[in-house]
Image: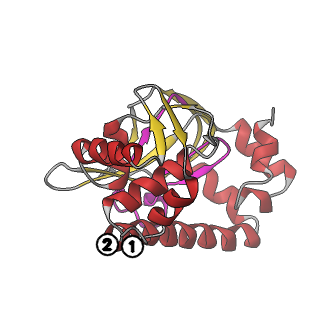
């Protein structure tokens, strides 16, 4: 199992720091655990922190003024979260939630910024990371604008259940989680799953899922569903 220092040595921004700087970061971190469904930071609050995911999974969630939830993307173990408020003292544009039990190391701005600032390459890398996030969000928005629900659901299944090649994989996403991720309703997700099953693309029940025709599902995911 990789240690925290080993993961940080390969993480964007932190990989540019010296071993001593990374060790200082670990020594000055606050360790927190959030259970599934708990909010790490709220959309609309000032959250000037950096968080390293030791284990588990977190997700960025946006909530519309009408209360509709939209999962933007997920983050897993050994990934680093940069709070937007660090850079502009403005409220967070989305909430960070625990998709499953997640353990975090957290640094406030006054701890992490001076350490990162010691290395100009690390400062430059911070900008690259933020641009990467912006491009990722653009792809999410593009998907909603130009791909139907069937295509978005097919992409989600192919991405999340990569190991389901003929053999059944545990179905660990609920209808509500799928709906939040692809921007639709649980009812439409349920109907689309049944459609995929009726067409022989997947085998699915309450606890398991398997791909039966991955090629056709990839065609749908690519937006060529007719």
Using the image, determine if residue 222 lies above or below residue 48. Answer: below
Q: Indicate the position of residue 123 as horizontal and vertical percent values.
A: 67, 70
Q: Indicate the position of residue 109 as horizontal and vertical percent values.
A: 54, 53
Seen at 43% across and 72% down, the residue is 224
Using the image, determine if residue 130 lies above or below residue 160. Answer: below
> Which of these two is toward me, 127 or 161?
161
Seen at 25% across and 48% down, the residue is 188
> Which of these two is toward me, 90 or 141?
141
| Residue 95 lies in the magenta-colored region | yes
The quarter of the image holding the C terminus is bottom left
Residue beneath disc 2: 145
Q: Dot 2: what SS?
A: helix
Residues shaded magenta: 73-102
> Which of these two is toward me, 67 or 217?
217
Residue farthest to the front?
199
Please give left or right for residue 154 compared with residue 42 in the image: right
Please give left or right for residue 200 compared with residue 117 in the image: left
Q: Is residue 41 visible?
A: yes
Using the image, determine if residue 45 lies above or below residue 132. Answer: above
Judge the density around disc 2: few (<14), some (14-19), many (≥20) Cα neighbours within 10 Å: few
Q: Dot 1: what SS?
A: helix
Residue farthest to the right?
19
Using the image, determine if residue 34 lies above or below residue 185. Answer: above
Residue beneath disc 1: 142
Circles 1 and 2: CB atoms closer than 8 Å? yes
> Which of these two is toward me, 68 or 125?
68
The quarter of the image holding the N terminus is top right
């Amino acid at each position: 199992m990789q240690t925290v220092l080993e993961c940080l040595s390969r993480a964007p921004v932190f990989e540019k720091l010296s071993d001593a700087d990374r060790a200082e970061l670990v020594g000055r971190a606050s360790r927190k655990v959030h259970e599934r469904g708990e909010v790490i930071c709220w959309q609309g609050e000032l959250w000037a922190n950096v968080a390293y995911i030791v284990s588990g999974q977190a997700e960025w969630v946006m909530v519309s003024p009408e209360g509709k939830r939209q999962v933007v993307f997920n983050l897993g173990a050994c990934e680093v979260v940069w709070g937007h408020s660090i850079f502009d003292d403005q409220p967070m544009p989305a909430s960070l939630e625990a998709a499953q039990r997640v353990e975090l190391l957290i640094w406030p701005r006054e701890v992490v910024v001076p350490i990162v600032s010691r290395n100009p390459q690390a400062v430059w890398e911070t900008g690259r990371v933020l641009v990467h996030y912006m491009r990722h969000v653009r792809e999410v928005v593009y998907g909603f604008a130009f791909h139907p629900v069937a295509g978005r659901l097919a992409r989600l299944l192919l991405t999340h259940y990569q190991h389901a090649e003929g053999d059944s994989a545990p179905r660990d996403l609920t209808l509500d989680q799928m709906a939040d991720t692809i921007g639709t309703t649980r009812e439409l997700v349920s109907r689309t799953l049944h459609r995929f099953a009726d067409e022989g693309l997947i085998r699915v029940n309450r606890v398991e899922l398997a791909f039966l025709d991955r090629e056709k599902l990839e065609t749908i995911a690519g937006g060529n569903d007719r």
